[in-house]
Amino acid sequence: MGMKRISHARLHLVVGSAVISVWTGCTGIDKLVPVVAPTQVCASPREETVACTLDGDTFDVSACGDQGERIRFLGVAAPEIAHDPKPAECWGDEAAAWVDERVTGRQVRLEFDSECTDIYGRTLAWIFITGDHSDPLYDELVDLGGIGILDDGSFDLLFNEFVVRAGQAGVYDENFAQDVLYYDRMVAAAAAAEADGLGMWSGCDK
């Protein structure tokens, strides 16, 4: 945890370099480039239906409340809604409404990373939505540079990335290890949203 995973191409180069270093008597490659194993996921993907949303980075599947399962979006840090006695943070209500409009009632695919639950017992997941050009989300994806759109015109959208790219949330950075599956995509989405002044990036004081 904490170090970026090495791509397959880089790994091949590392292995090749390691062989050369043995032949030439050079310093061992492991001392130069630490090799981090790929993330081991904690569970298999599964399909669920979103019953209701709680805020900009949490929803319930199957049923609302205790009868359902609470899902926390991996890598996403949305502004807080009001929690008595604390008022809502800037863009907290807007982010919650934005997420609710786009996912409530939808079937989603949950994918997992190295840890399946957080300290509150919520399920940590990457959320995927599939669709095509007839889906109301399609035009939004086009406007954001074609995020999630495939060559055949359908889309397989990483919703966590979409929330951040649309400026509704930032990237969760407390103990958010760089070797999670979609770290680079999440960071790039946040940078693009800030550069474009989307959502909270123009609606809130920095």
Image (tube, helix red, strand yellow):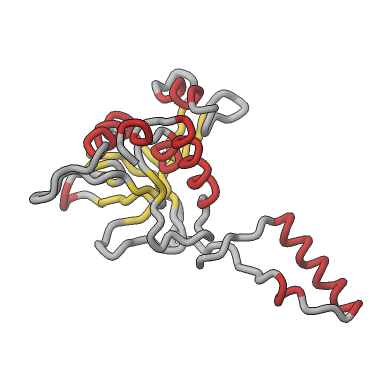
* Quadrant where the C terminus is found in the figure: top left
Q: Residue at x 31, y 44 (%)?
A: 78
Task: State how many labels appear.
Answer: 0
- Residue 38 in picture, x, y percent from top left: 59, 63
Say which quarter of the image contains residue 150. Answer: top right
Q: Residue at x 71, y 77 (%)?
A: 31
Does residue 164 appear left or right of residue 81 in this picture?
Answer: right
| Residue 61 seen in this snapshot | no
19 lies above or below 62: below
Residue that protrudes farthest toward the left in the picture: 85
Q: Residue at x 41, y 48 (%)?
A: 171
- Residue 83 in picture, x, y percent from top left: 13, 49
Residue that protrudes farthest toward the bottom in the picture: 25
Q: Residue at x 67, y 56 (%)?
A: 7
115 lies above or below 205: below
24 lies above or below 56: below
- Residue 48 in picture, x, y percent from top left: 34, 43
Does residue 95 appear left or right of residue 136 in this picture?
Answer: left
User: Closer to the camera, 131 or 26?
Assistant: 26
User: Closer to the camera, 91 or 139?
Assistant: 91
| Residue 114 seen in this snapshot | yes
